[in-house]
Image (cartoon, rainbow, N blue to C red):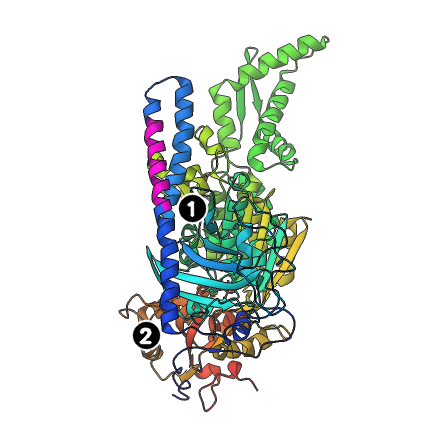
Amino acid sequence: MARPGGQKAAGRVRLQAAPRADGPRAPHERRESCVAAQTATPGVRDQEIAAEQVHLDRVYRRLEEKITEAEFLMHDAAQRGHVGTPGALAERDAQVFRAGVRLNRLNNEFEDFLFGRIDLLRGKDGKKGPDGAYTSVDPADDAVAANGTAEIAETLHIGRIGVLDSDFAPLVIDWRAPAAAPFYRSTPVAPGRVVRRRVIRSKGRRVLGVEDDLLRPELTTGLPVVGDGALMAALGQARTHTMRDIVASIQAEQDLVIRAPAASVTEVTGGPGTGKTAVALHRAAYLLYQDRRRYSGGILCVSPTPLLVAYTEGVLPSLGEEGQVAIRAVGSLVDGVTADLYDEPAVARVKGSLRMQKVLRNAARGCLDMVQDRPSLLRVVAFGRRIELGEEELAEVRRQALGGTAPVNLLRPRARRLLLDALWRKTGRRFHDAELAAEERQAFDEDITTETDFTAFLDAWWPLLQPRGVLTALADERRLSRWARRVLTPPEVRRVARSLRRDGTSVHDVALLDELETLLGAPPREKKRDLDPLDQLTGLDELMPDVGESARERAERLARERTEYTHVIVDEAQDLTPMQWRMVGRRGRTATWTIVGDPAQSSWSDVDEAARARDEALGTRPRRRFTLTVNYRNPAEIADVASTVLALAMPGSEPPRAVRSTGVLPRYEVAGGDLGADVRDAAERLLGEVDGTVGVVVAMNRRAQARGWVEGLGDRVVALGSLEAKGLEYDATVVVSPAEIAEESPAGLRVLYVALTRATQRLTVLAREADLPDADGVPDLLRAD
Ligand SMILES: Nc1ncnc2c1ncn2[C@@H]1O[C@H](COP(=O)(O)OP(=O)(O)OP(=O)(O)O)[C@@H](O)[C@H]1O
């Protein structure tokens, strides 16, 4: 064992780096230039909290009035329903709908929904927007007097939904409304009208604290400044197993992405911890707010793992959005399939590659040839005699039918027609009169096709193929090698066939099943329930009490029924394989897109091929690109170690700037004979050092083993494989044998980069011999020199 991590952090976090004179600033830089001038005494803090409490009380009183109003509407609407005329019923439905939506929203938002305030100078013009706030971004020319004094002309409170008082003046502005944008966008470099930005912390009806940023410190306004910065307070909090929304502390560069117009494709890149996932989810809520009708067609958010789905799925409900957004793991995009296996890298590489398209196309057609007990003779009776098609004639018909490019199952009607043609020819009937010939032929077709012998023959001879059946057929090595001739190498065939013989479905199999569904043609689905006309109204999903299912159940049902979406969000987009891009692309053929990712964290080896598939999925739609540059997750001490690996994985790429520093260096240890015991010790020590969660990240092939190592340590500790760590974060992590993780696949260094960037406070690296640790226990791969 060597090099214990640096000394314990001395109290609170330190801010990094000096402010820059130009360009966008990191949030901490802003704070440094904001707060120095005035920091409130405890008495002032209490006064400011009390002032916010007065406002919050007013808001709650108004909410109560609104709830009473909504309840009355519901009751009144139900009464009207008793009249019983169709007109009264329609009116009742519409009223119930509106009142239900309002009631449900108000109840949802009752807790902790007011979080921000901005104090503004007078605007250039006196115009107000629909939310009652002045619209001008810039201050009036005379808003600041020559001696530097200024008056606050407007104070806006920001919350999760908008609330107007009885005079239609804004008590709370919805965070997504245009008037709230300055809360997120203003910086000391470009403050606009904002003099002070305040984040309010409240629980239920009680204001607990306020945190201020003074954006125009040069002005004399008499506004006190309280607290040490909302962002730092949020980042320093212990982590749980679910992600929190960042609505109170969205940063300017993130806000630009969240509010970007929905047109076409919005692409966001940024290193680990820059808030890509958070931004993508807030964007979904923003889009719904902007145009709920349009997005009632559904927003799909594709996540790499079920763990990340579980981690993020609470964020949208906390923003007041539920039901319209389906968050699905890439392994759960096909109905009725849950993928719980990971293929070994060599197999995943083949299954994810575009070469599989050709193999699957051959298999979809080839499977018709391997139908067991396929009849080799078709015998019907027509015109008082037997007509037969023998094996060779049937083979010829099949060959002709398969000549089309349509999906195999959809070629069945064509095969049926060709059979009838062949049978008709065999009758030897000739007519000079075309009309008579057509009539006779029609009668012949009707006779034959209503014969049960013929329909039974067709079912046996050209059965409807199911994707699962074709995938199972690929498990036979001989068959697979025939269908994969000149596409896959013999070792690849062997490995893929072997992987398909085991029980269970892998994440990569799901994209194959989806591709097969397209190649085969979807078998007729169960008839959908009749479309409920009220579904056309926006936000109906919020009427839970009336439809007897929870928001979540309804969201799941809608997601199951839906195959195409109006907006598709892809999280960790760098990890989608080409075959997965095809699968996701099919779900957003007419959609707009938001794609977030980081090439440096890609676990897919052939980056160019994935880029081609992605371009195909997105088509020629115009793209708008954004880059996020600040790392909110890792302290600088951990980010520095990760950047050593980044330099190896993606030479020349720039790591994001860490927003804070804890003073605690990563700890390096070398495992002895009992790896499991050492991992357990390391995890236990970290549990004592942090309040929240601890993640133990191991190479994928040690997943099961590692779960055993941490058993009994409680639910604050999780053991997971390197690929499962995507997008997640923990207060502290133990990364076990960087070399093992890096050597696991051709993209291993990038996967290691992911593993090293999961911790918000502490990192322990446990080296093995293969890591070639130096005298301090630092693995070869993590040495800066
Ligand atoms: N503006 C913000 N205010 C407070 N917390 C933030 C902010 N932006 C990001 N965070 C926090 O930083 C952490 C990282 O965010 P997120 O997981 O969205 O990053 P990411 O870019 O998706 O990371 P990765 O690429 O590693 O998956 C989260 O805990 C998130 O809540």
Q: How many numbered discs?
A: 2
Which mark is in front, 1 or 2? 1
* Ligand 1 has an atom within 8 Å of the beta carbon of the residue at disc 1: no
Horizontally, residue 230 falls left or right of residue 145, namely left
Examine the rendered structure and indicate whether residue 543 appears above or below residue 593: above
Q: Amino acid at mark 2?
A: Leu
Q: Which residues are magenta?
A: 62-78
Horizontally, residue 776 falls left or right of residue 747, namely left
| Residue lying at the far bottom of the rendered structure | 775
Residue in front for this viewpoint, 468 or 425: 468
- Disc 1 is placed on an element classified as loop
Mark 2 Cα within 10 Å, few/some/many (few <14, many 20+)?
many
- Is 67 inside the magenta-drawn segment? yes
Mark 1 = which residue? 322
Mark 2 = which residue? 687
Residue at 46 percent across and 60 percent down: it is: 248
Tell me the quarter of the image containing the C terminus: bottom right
Query: Residue 432, how many percent across, how many down?
Result: 73, 9
- Is 190 inside the magenta-drawn segment? no
On the question of residue 548 being in view, the answer is no
Examine the rendered structure and indicate whether residue 666 appears above or below residue 517: below
Query: Residue 605, how many percent across, how many down?
Result: 58, 65
- Disc 2 is placed on an element classified as helix
Query: Residue 226, how many percent across, how many down?
Result: 43, 69
Q: Amino acid at mark 1?
A: Glu
First along the sequence among labels 1 and 2 = 1
Tell me the quarter of the image containing the N terminus: bottom left
Main SS of the magenta part reads helix
Residue in front for this viewpoint, 733 or 520: 733
Residue in front for this viewpoint, 486 or 89: 89
